[in-house]
Amino acid sequence: MINEITNQEVYLACGSTDLRKSIDSLAVLVKESFNLDPFSPCLFVFCNRNRDKLKILQWDHNGFWLYYRRLEKGKFDWPEKNTDILSISYRQLRWLLDGLSLKETRGHQEVKERTII
């Protein structure tokens, strides 16, 4: 399961990525193409050309996690712009994984009150 630290950064590799790439190849892509540290406590998300598969790379103490998600129907609402990286919140990642748009303007507001009636 993805480490649910809600204040960690999430980076999307916009456009399409060849998902035949392994952990090492994706880590090199993060370091060399995006000038980011693949060993940082961030999630790096990649999508295929058909927008029906995702890979998420995450460093965890002494090794990488590689998560893979394949949709049986439908497509992810993935940013098209190639060779760019987009920083989003963990909440937006959950929206993306649930099939929602990153530009979602309506949603339930976070409840900050901690009282019981």
Image (tube, rainbow, N blue to C red):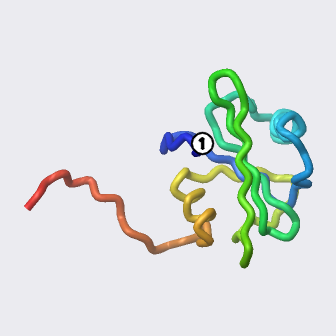
Find the residue positioned furthest to the bottom.
Answer: 74
Q: Secondary structure at mark 1?
A: loop
What residue is disc 1 on?
9
In the picture, measured across the screen, residue 41 lies left or right of residue 47, that is left
The residue that appears at 83% across and 33% down in the rendered structure is: 31
For the residue pair 1 and 77, the one nearer the viewer reads as: 1
Give the number of marks.
Answer: 1
Q: Position of residue 94 (x, y in %)?
A: 56, 59
Q: Residue at x 81, y 39 (%)?
A: 30
Q: Amino acid at mark 1?
A: Glu
| Residue at far left of view | 117
Q: Is residue 31 left or right of residue 41?
A: right
What residue is drawn where x is 63% and y is 46%? 10
In the image, residue 86 sits, relative to residue 36, either above or below, namely below
Q: Quadrant of residue 50?
A: bottom right
Residue 73 image position (x, y, % from top left):
73, 78
Above or below 37: residue 7: below
Rendering quarter of residue 29: top right
CA neighbours of label 1 inside 10 A, class few (<14), some (14 to 19), many (20+): some
Quadrant of the snapshot with the C terminus: bottom left
